[in-house]
Amino acid sequence: MGQKTVEGHTRYLPGVGGDPTMTSREPTRRRFLRRAGAALGVSSLLGAAGCSESTDDPDDPSPSPVPTPTASPTVDGTGPTGGSPTATETATPLPPLDGSWESFRHDAANTGATDDPGPVEEPVERWHTTLSVGGPATAPAAGDGAFFAVSESGVVRAIEAADGSVRWTGSRRMDDVAPAVGNGTVVVVAGTELAGLATDDGTERWSVFLDAPVDGLATASGRVVAATGDSVAAFGLADGERRWHRSVDGTVSNAPAVDDGTVAVGLDSGAVLALDAGSGERRWRKSVGGTAEHAPAVTDGRVYAAGESSVVAFDASDGTERWTADTEYPVSGSLLATADGVYVGTLNEHAGRTPTGGDGDSTRTPTPYPTDTYGYGAVMRSLAPGDGRERWQVTLTGKWYFTEGVPTIRFGHTGDRVLVGVQSTLAALDAADGDRLWTARYDGFGFAVTDDVVSTGTRGIGLADGSVQWEFEPGRSNVGSSPAVVGNTLYVGSDDYRLYALAANSGAVRWSAQTDGLVRSSPAVDEDAVYVGSIEGTLYAFDRADGRELWTFDTGGTVQWAPALADGTLYLGNFDRTVFAVDAADGTERWRAEPGGRFVTGDPAVGDDAVFAGANGVVKAFETSDGSERWGHTFGERSRVQSTPAVAGGRVFVFVGESLYAFDTATGDEAWSVKTGQANVAPAVRDGVVYASAVDRQHEEAHVSAFDAAEGTELWRTELGEGRRVVVGDGAVYGVHYDAPAVALDPSNGDELWRGGDATATTTPALAGEYLFVGTDTGQVRAFGPSHRA
């Protein structure tokens, strides 16, 4: 039960919060600083499958975990759960391409090979398009009828306050520093750079650089104040013109607080520093003890700062201490100050291991918390600005998990009410007496208010009554579907539950189609349709021209692998140990078969009238005509089938355990095997040569090797620091990795042709002409090609 004291009278409120699915997201102080920033200050509140092939852990036979979707985006991408992806070109637009990479690893045989050259010379990024930006990574800022936050993928997204629709999505990657808004400008951070973006359309109005990375922002009176580790600077919101810059004797520990006349910051030394907002001149520096961890508050000629368990009021002009109020428990979060009250949140982080009747029912038998869970009491106090006298006190109870960190209490103020967010609860309190007006679910990052709507990042809450006005389901920030390129169109799935068609020469979105889950499966394309599976187990057919849904087929299990399309039939496996043959024309089932094992471990390959599929410790061939088994091999528990198979020249090539095997497609006889190290990425086959990437765990090295497809003789080996997803064109062998540069190797001898800077990828690449296309775990599709092509 929470204790509430109003002018000496005490009564109890039912506990709120404690949603076990919504835990504190800020385990470190540094994370708090970057995410909370100034978005919780008064100014901003008022608005003034192929991808599933892991190159790092081939010992793990289980599929990559995927989140359970909680909602589906809107179909047209314009409502509360959709958005308009943005394409950014870094060079002259390309002429239309004529791609022929029609499915995962190019063809139904999974050869990973094409006659197109790919980028033989070191390429540049020609364009990138952000499809899936993910959820918010910072607290939102508010202004001009919208909320602004940096997403998990590092791009800024503007959400309309009225209905939750996407106003615009930025194209540049930014740091997870909370934005600040004022005068029609939203200010964001990229390292040492400040960028001012127009709130109406996201266009860049100005850009300036500091000497060190920016950690926090605040706006007031036509200026934005930025704090770095050892300095504070002010810039004009309209033009980015530097007004002043002041070095700090010490280390700034929080975001700045600013009003018309004063800027205040806390320092690691436990001091608070006050500067003149107009000139940056130092006024005073006073100690409050501890580390001055939480941002101070500035209003009406006073600076309010938090000690470890106290609040101190200083005169803003000369630093004279006006009063000190003890808080009993440690302060947890930045202060909020208005003309009527100073609001401080403190936390009794071990209020008890057994909750009281959280719903107000004192007759319930309390249930002990698990060993990693603690009860908390979040105590909110309103102090009189004049003398620090307590006006009222409210306690909200809940629980927190030690693995996620101690909860942080956040305040906001508008009109006659104070907003407070802690753990999973957002509460509106009457500013005069602390009466609770309403509570709503809270995301945990922070909140902001504009146009009578409170945004917690993924939902809009009515300020008047706490009702949900809209919800935004951003999906995860990831493109885990390997692209297909046919003609001048690139097809790719995303973790925002959609299949996209992009212009291959520019990245412009032509259409997107809704699915029922994350799309990790890679598309397969024919003359009429695009076929792709969802994590929810549905195989879709969409019209190539406009994305209209043609039919669906329920596989009954997760579909993470790409379908193989051959002679009008789609062949695909799911995590329910089943391989299906589905008619591409109407989605009817032709047959199904079970290779054995716990689940199908990769994308089936088709060739020589057979379908080849692997499961843990099993590789089998099924007749395309009726699904009957042609042959099969079962290996020991330590020799799991790890990779997607590839078919060429009467052989099927597949990694099993630490070896690459070649089997006769007709009989299943072993033609050869060679010990390579472990791999769960498919080999590529072209012109009688097999190109494979593997990791030798014993010697802790990774390599790409070339083998004679007929005999298994190793032709060359190139040592690399990491495993690669490998494809081959007429000009080079290409290998990509999620956390290392792309490489291009000479197919004749393995010599390195180039190493591609930041060309990281979480998908198998697609090749078209002289260009290479990949998806990333930041929600982007990226195109790389020669810089000299117009």
Image (tube, grey):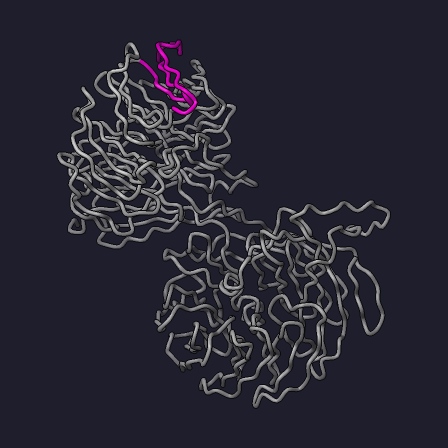
Residue 461: give x, y in percent of width and height: 63, 56
* Left or right for 690, reference 423: left
Q: Quadrant of residue 110?
A: top left
Residue 599: give x, y in percent of width and height: 46, 24
Q: Is residue 210 above or below residue 274?
A: above
Residue 193: give x, y in percent of width and height: 36, 68
Camera-side residue of 211 and 770: 211
Identify which residue is drawn at 52% across, 71% down: 254
Q: Quadrant of the N terminus?
A: bottom right
Q: Is residue 387 above or below residue 781?
A: below
Identify which residue is drawn at 34% across, 51% down: 87
Q: Which residues are magenta?
A: 610-639
Q: Magenta segment: does it hold 118?
A: no
* Left or right for 379, reference 529: right
Question: Is residue 571 visible in this depiction of the protein?
Answer: yes
Q: Magenta segment: does it hold 632?
A: yes
Total numbered circles: 0
